[in-house]
Image: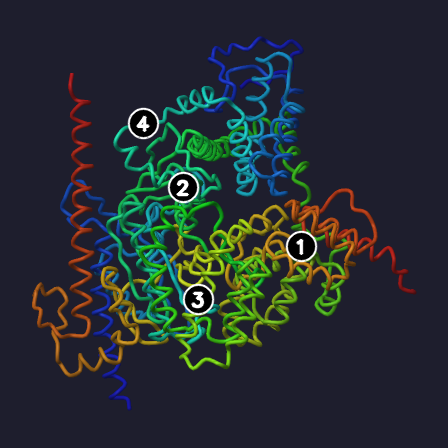
Amino acid sequence: MEVIRSQKRTPSNDTVSNPKIPLYLTAPQMEVRLEEFELFAVDRLRVLKGVSDGLARGRNPKEMDDLVDTLWKEHMRDPDASLMFNKDIISHFVLRLVYCRSDELKKWFLSMETALFRHRFRLQNFEAQRAIVGEFGLPYKAVTGAELEGLKERLGQVVRSLGQISPTVEAVYYKVPFEEVPDLVASRRVLIQKGYAFVAGSQLVSLVVTQFRSHISKALILTNRKWTTTIREREKDRLTPIVEALSTSYLGPDYSQSTEYAEISLKDIDQVAKSSFPLCMRHLFEKVREDHHLKHGGRMQLGLFLKGVGLKLDDALAFWRAEFTKKVGSERFDKEYAYSIRHNYGKEGKRTDYTPYACQKIILSAPGAGDHHGCPYRHFSEDNLRAALGRMGLSSRGMEGVMDQVRNKHYQLACTMTFEAVYGTSCDAGINHPNQYFEESQKILKSKTPPAPV
Amino acid sequence: MAFLRTRYVLVLSLTLTLKAILLLIITSSMVVIDGKHPGCDEYYFGRREFSFTLENDVYLRYKSFKSVSSLEHAIKSCFPYKIDIGAVYSVDPDKRHAYSQTGTNVFTPVERELVFDIDITDYDDVRYCCSGADVCSKCWPLMTVAIKVIHTSLKEDFGFKHILWVFSGRRGVHCWVCDPKARRMTNEQRSAVAEYFRVYKGNENNARKVALMGYSLHPFLARSYVDLLKGFFEGELQANQSIFSTKDKYDKILEMISDEDIQSELREKWEKSANRSSLSEEAISLVRWDQLKNTLQSKKHKAPTLRMCVEEIVFTFAYPRIDLEVSKQMNHLLKAPFCVHPKTGRVCVPIDPNNCDEFDPLAVPTLSQLIEEINSGGSKMDVDDDDDDDTDTSLLGKSIKFFRSSFLEPLLKSCKEEIESSYKTKIDKSKDSFSW
């Protein structure tokens, strides 16, 4: 891809048969204007951010299909089909440069591009889908005849287990090694026998999404290599500043560096927890005080949050030690727990300074037996959630609004409503990070208290 | 005192040698067997990560060894309390810092067995005889049924052939799936298998920890239910735990029914009959279970969440609860088979999945028993002795024999076949390139 400054755009030499969704297998041979370089990327980023929001709000697949359709039409459409296609490709490859540069960026980009691809694929008709499957060159054959007959009953059971009352077994099934469709296996949406999964025609999307994801993942590693070895230096006066600006402007602050509002000391922590922590962190904090212990998921979620809130490493160690030694003793604490607290602050191991979890990540986590992390709006039963909200001071009317959001799986909106009810103010931005909740809360509380006398 | 101490150390070292030798057998199975075969990778063993836990909880990761004898030597000189086996990496773990994190020689896992860890403490909310680190003959059957469910699925659904089940030494079991295609699975694929096995999704914050949706069970769950779980729940589990016999116990189960009316109906019935019955705890429990089933059967059309409520209760109590994190990542370490558990002194012996009803965790040989055996000179400690002697009455004789014949030999055979066939393919390919 050649980036040029000229005003004229040279016509694309794309002789590809033009399937509706490009697979981004190779970088296109075309010229791109510098302004388009940035603009196209920004538009695509709006789409990806919209996808990210939709997933965090727990939208079901059909809702995501509609969302993607809307987002794409809004930001990526062009009356000229081939120009639209070019924008699609160019914007993707520009964002690869932007998001290849760190593990976290890669992970986010990979998840969003895969989700985008998945839902765009689902919106295609069956013929178009078959064509795309063909493009990947997957050698799977359909199951027919006696083999299909023998499986019919169990295939019907699978269909019924997914909520369809009458077991209509589809006409076409593909026999595929189970490794190729991990998400279908994980959610038990396919019959598996002797290492093979039997994938229905309507489930093809899983097959291609796995291929797509694997390809993009490998591509990002190569792009990163090229970026660090040649491109970044070569383009330092032209593309590099654009690339570097693009990643920070849209993910929002990551709260890994504490701000002026956010320094808390150990002696204030109980009071601050009551007044400014979002429900998820309040729950974890209360459990630590109560049980003098937390399992790994909870330690990560709360520990990183406290770091984002401005708790220094020494104070953090003192806090966890004070609680854990009540249960496990000081020696065990030093051996088993102190290391990972220091690890979180980037003082051990590969010295990554880990960032506090955003709501999206917390909502998607999977707390199990003995865990207290996760998002209470999603993971608590209704009764437990009501009790917790009551303890936060919500009136029964306020609670109904929140529970309504929960029932519709709008967990972040529920948290936002809680925030608004607790502080008596509106929060237009919407909560999407626990540290954001904390900072906003502190802002409000500090503006209400008069400054201390000098 | 000093004399005894020296003797103890000597004896300990002998035992550890035994352990070492056994380990070598295992690890050599994860290596090329025939070092002389031109198709073998002589550096494979050197790229396997081991970790040692020494006295005073000193933990040493990323240990690797060029050969089986250097592993043995290290064990004898370090006296690790625990030995974990990790993945086979792209380069020798103990040389990993010599390679940069970029470029083609990145330090990353390349192969690792698919592993599972089931710990009975994860069942504390459904066992009444013990809690925490304890285990007894009344709750151990939970592990037995877990082995059967998972083993059947690994074989029938996933087509794996080389599966080793090992007692974890105190309160659980580990599973090692050693098929070549299992070793090459990515983290995403491992995660998928772990999630496939996951049914219990709960902690104290939600009441209904197993939610079976849809109009029927997935064939895997249906088979597990019909062949294993239902019978276990209504038989052994009820007999051992009497889960309906007291109010505390049955309240917990009633909370799993998502209909308040049905809950109160049953609660009333049981409260009335509480003092009047002369039946045993076990019998009362069974009667109440029958009553619950009948009530639900007649009322299950009331709501979709009631459709499979009976099955949900059975699954909550009896279905395996694996530790997902252990299975999902290639770099996760797991205790080596035949290790001695530092807290109980028991040897982590293999469990025969086709005979796991017979396994008794409280009858497993301990380190002190082994020491005594060695001291009394009562058994030959030469493990490499190919004596097929059925009269081998040594404490670990049976376990070693089982390990060899049911697991190791078939695996060695299959690895050899794989090496030979891939070597042959390579030769054939290069022959082609020579043709004019």
Point out the residue furthest to the right here.
A453
Report whether B227 appears left or right of B305.
Answer: left
Q: Amino acid at mark 4?
A: Lys
Do the residues under discs 3 and 4 have CB atoms within 8 angstroms?
Answer: no
User: Going 41% across and 29% down the picture, which residue do you hit?
Assistant: A201
Q: CA distance from mark 1 to mark 2?
A: 45 Å
Is disc 3 in the same subunit as disc 2? no
- Crowding at label 4, few (<14), some or many (≥20) Cα neighbours within 10 Å? few
Residue A443 pos. (x, y %): 81, 53
Q: What mark, if any, has residue B393 been given in the picture? A: none
Q: Chain of mark 4?
A: A
The amino acid on which the numbered mark 3 sits, given as a three-letter code, is Trp
Q: Position of residue B264 (x, y in %)?
A: 58, 66
Closest to the camera, between mark 4 and mark 1, is 4
Q: CA distance from mark 4 to mark 2?
A: 20 Å
Visible in this render: residue A180?
Answer: yes
Mark 1 or 2, nearer chain start: 2
Left or right relative to A282: residue A275: right
Q: Which residue is mark 1?
A: A308
Q: Amino acid at mark 1?
A: Gly
Quickly name the residue at label 2: A158
The label on residue A141 is: 4
Q: CA distance from mark 3 to mark 2?
A: 28 Å
Front label number (3 vs 1): 3
The local crowd at label 2, few if under 14, some if 14 to 19, many if 20 or more residues have their Cα within 10 Å, is many
Please check whether the numbered discs 4 and 2 fall on a single chain: yes
Q: Amino acid at mark 2?
A: Val
Q: Secondary structure at mark 2?
A: helix
- x and y percent of residue B275 in the render? 50, 81
Gap in angstroms between the C-alphas marked 4 and 1 = 52 Å
Per the model, the C-alpha gap separating discs 3 and 1 is 51 Å
